[in-house]
Amino acid sequence: MGFKIGDVLVFDVQGVEVEGEIINLRKVKWTSFQPNFFILVQNGVLSEAPKSWIAAIPFLPDQQRSELQNAIAKEFSNVSVIDVVRTVDDVLRTAEKMSWSLELMAGLALLTGYIVLFSIVRSQIKLRRWELNMLKILGASWGEVASFILTEFAFLAFIASFFGAALSVVVSFALNTFIFESDFKFSLVQPLLSVVIITVLSLVISLLASLDIVRESALSILREEK
């Protein structure tokens, strides 16, 4: 809200105005399920004001947790009990569903990309069919021709996957730092693994798209030219 140290705030506590000067700032950890106090005041300022007491109970087994909740509700009707474990489980289940949806969308995008890649490689190989067969006529084996093609598309796949992985790291850093205000822990293994897997799959798709033309006899295209 743009507050800074030295600003004076006026709080309305059930009709009574209380002034407070900001003398320090604190960072709230949103990932913690402990109570996060947004404003702390010195002793005596709000001592006589109505208040609510909050207590946190350590982890208990399911049976003991249910018995404790029932006992508290029976003895103290004005006490509200929040089952943090159940809340966390609900949040985790929702996060798992969202993660599954994102993974499905990523898989569909990857599948669509490989279909497009197959079409592009197929089209390019057909356009360069005469050039590739000329290499065979000059003495190149079909393995050398295939390696020539795969090297070209491997470079393109590596560049695309590298920039994609780098962009994902940047977006993750921005979301964690500026949106969720949590610590960002960079892991080099996952981006590198994604780059390697995507590059290898791209090579396999490129090989399948060009295999029949690469293994084609150079004599056949010479006869077609006649």
Image (tube, rainbow, N blue to C red):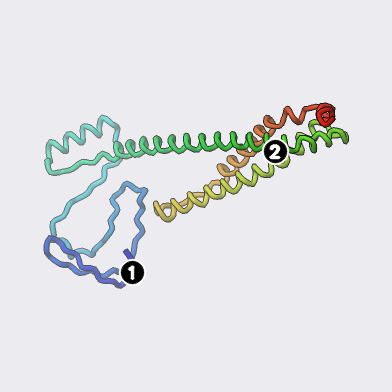
Q: Nearer the viewer, residue 43 or 5?
A: 5
Q: Secondary structure under badge 2?
A: helix
Q: Nearer the viewer, residue 2 or 123?
A: 123
Which amino acid, by three-letter code, is at mark 2? Gln
**Which residue is the site of mark 1?**
4
Which amino acid, by three-letter code, is at mark 1? Lys
Q: Place residue 99 in its image quadrant.
A: top left
Q: Nearer the viewer, residue 189 or 174?
A: 174
Q: Place residue 64 in its image quadrant.
A: top left
Rendered residue at 33%/66% (across/down) = 2
Residue 124, label in figure: 2
In the displayed structure image, the side of residue 150 where residue 50 appears, left or right: left
Q: In front of the other: label 1 or label 2?
A: 2
Which quarter shows the N terminus? bottom left
Residue 98's x, y, as percent?
40, 38
In the displayed structure image, the side of residue 186 where residue 53 appears, left or right: left
The single residue placed furthest to the bottom in the displayed view is: 6
The single residue placed furthest to the front in the displayed view is: 226
Residue 28's x, y, as percent?
34, 56
In the displayed structure image, the side of residue 158 where residue 168 appears, left or right: left
**Mark 1 or mark 2: which comes first in sequence?**
1
- Crowdedness near tag 2: few (<14), some (14–19) or many (≥20) residues, C-alpha within 10 Å: few
Rendered residue at 54%/50% (across/down) = 167
Rendered residue at 64%/42% (across/down) = 157
Q: Nearer the viewer, residue 73 or 222?
A: 222
Residue 67's x, y, as percent?
21, 32
Spatial separation of the CA atoms under disc 1 and disc 2: 61 Å
Give the answer, above or below, for where 216 lies relative to 53. above
